[in-house]
Image: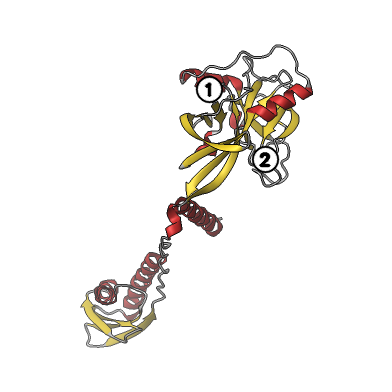
């Protein structure tokens, strides 16, 4: 882009000078001779034209063809011949610098190795091993695993809802406890509990919970498939259950509003949105509870029914994602 801008600027400069000089001298131009110098080899390329811009263009094409690049064609001179037999010579520097092309990262024997790349949370909804999580937790993964009774088991992705960020997983696990899903959406100021594995297993492998209330019945941009809560949802909570005191799932933890000066703004996917998607894919849920549960009973349900979901990718794919992220950062930094 800089090369193109440099050439455009130079052409404007030349054409502007041409107009200025002809007007100032009051003479008719017969011919213009351009000489472009390759500053690396010292070789000169000369050509003629009726105007400054055409003569420069002819000579530059020869230099660029020889060197394969404009980066060494950085200096040129112009000689203008007039109808009265006189001539004028002008020298111009060309500041054209090409950015070095980024080298593709060399492949290594490790590139095909599949390793853990990220994690989230999920929860069992059937005794046959069906589990729910967010789509973004398993997006692009080569293998997905969930932790159950101290060991990991590989899961299949049965269906995804990219718009509402839901995924249905199927494992060979046979859970003792499953979560029922509420038939009713949350109400304003209803008490809720978020369960999951915030920050993965960096702190500990134990399940973690946060309590709060429903603070709005719509998500960002008035998205009524979501609701807002002040119960903390951190990285790694994604896909975990949001339950009420009855132990029924009323939402799926999905996102937090991250902005300076903003606190306690977290979002969940409504149970009605989950049920609509599940029904469309032939998955039904256990009947919801109608009585409040003790905290001890809720703790047992959360501990046995919530799962740690781990995304595995090839080293090559992870390298590519890191490179793309760095390119985006560089782009925004350059253009902000």
Instruction: Examine the rendering and report whether any part of residue 67 can be seen.
Output: yes
Circle 2 crowding by C-alpha within 10 Å: few under 14, some 14–19, many from 20: many
1 and 2 marks in contact (CB < 8 Å) = no
Q: Nearer the viewer, residue 80 or 47?
A: 47
**Is tag 1's residue or tag 2's residue first in the polypeptide sequence?**
1
Res. 222 image quadrant: top right
Q: Nearer the viewer, residue 294 or 21?
A: 294
Residue 294 spot, x, y in % from top left: 78, 20
- Relative horizontal placement of residue 238, taking residue 56 as reference (left or right): right
Direction top: furthest residue: 290
**Does residue 43 sit above or below 334 in this rendering?**
below
The label on residue 242 is none
Instruction: Examine the rendering and report whether any part of residue 218 can be seen.
Output: no
Query: What secondary structure is found at the residue carrying circle 1?
Result: loop
Residue 334 spot, x, y in % from top left: 53, 59
Query: What secondary structure is found at the residue carrying circle 2?
Result: loop
Residue 298 spot, x, y in % from top left: 73, 23
Residue 302 spot, x, y in % from top left: 69, 28
Res. 49 image quadrant: bottom left
The Cα–Cα distance between marks 1 and 2, rounded to whole angstroms, is 26 Å
* Placement of the C terminus among the 4 image quadrants: bottom right
**Does residue 181 sit above or below 80 in this rendering?**
above
Q: Nearer the viewer, residue 216 or 63?
A: 216
Residue position for label 2 = 198
**Does residue 101 sit above or below 284 in this rendering?**
below
* Placement of the N terminus among the 4 image quadrants: bottom left
Q: Nearer the viewer, residue 1 or 58?
A: 1
Residue positioned 45% across, 42% down in the render:
142
User: In this figure, which colouring scheme has been used for the structure?
Assistant: secondary structure
- Relative horizontal placement of residue 237, taking residue 312 as reference (left or right): right
Residue position for label 1 = 128
């Amino acid at each position: 882009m800089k090369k193109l801008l440099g050439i455009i600027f130079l052409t404007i400069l030349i054409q502007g000078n041409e107009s200025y000089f002809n007007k100032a001298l009051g003479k008719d131009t017969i011919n213009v001779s351009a000489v472009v110098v390759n500053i690396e080899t010292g070789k000169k390329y000369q050509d003629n034209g009726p105007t400054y811009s055409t003569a420069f263009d002819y000579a530059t094409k020869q230099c660029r063809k020889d060197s394969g690049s404009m980066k060494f064609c950085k200096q040129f001179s112009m000689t203008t011949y007039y109808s009265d037999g006189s001539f004028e010579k002008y020298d111009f520097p060309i500041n054209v610098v090409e950015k070095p092309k980024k080298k593709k990262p060399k492949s290594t024997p490790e590139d095909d190795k599949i390793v853990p790349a990220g994690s989230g949370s999920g929860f069992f909804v059937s005794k046959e091993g069906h589990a729910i999580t967010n789509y973004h937790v398993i997006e692009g993964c080569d293998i997905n695993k969930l932790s159950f009774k101290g060991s990991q088991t590989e899961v299949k992705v049965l269906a995804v809802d990219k718009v509402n960020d839901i995924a249905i997983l199927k494992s060979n696990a046979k859970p003792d406890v499953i979560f029922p899903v509420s038939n009713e959406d949350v109400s304003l100021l209803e008490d809720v509990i978020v369960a999951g594995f915030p920050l993965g297993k960096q702190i500990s492998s134990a399940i973690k919970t946060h309590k709060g209330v429903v603070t709005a019945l719509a998500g960002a941009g008035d998205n009524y498939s979501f609701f807002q809560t002040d119960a903390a949802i951190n990285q790694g909570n994604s896909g975990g259950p949001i339950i009420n005191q009855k132990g029924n799932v009323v939402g799926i933890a999905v996102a937090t509003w991250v902005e300076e000066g903003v606190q306690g703004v977290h979002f969940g996917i409504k149970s009605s949105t989950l049920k609509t998607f599940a029904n469309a894919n032939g998955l039904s849920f256990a009947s919801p509870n109608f009585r409040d549960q003790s905290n001890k009973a809720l703790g047992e349900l959360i501990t046995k029914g919530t799962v740690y979901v781990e995304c595995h990718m090839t080293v090559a794919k992870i390298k590519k994602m890191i490179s793309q992220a760095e390119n985006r950062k560089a782009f925004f930094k350059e253009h902000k």
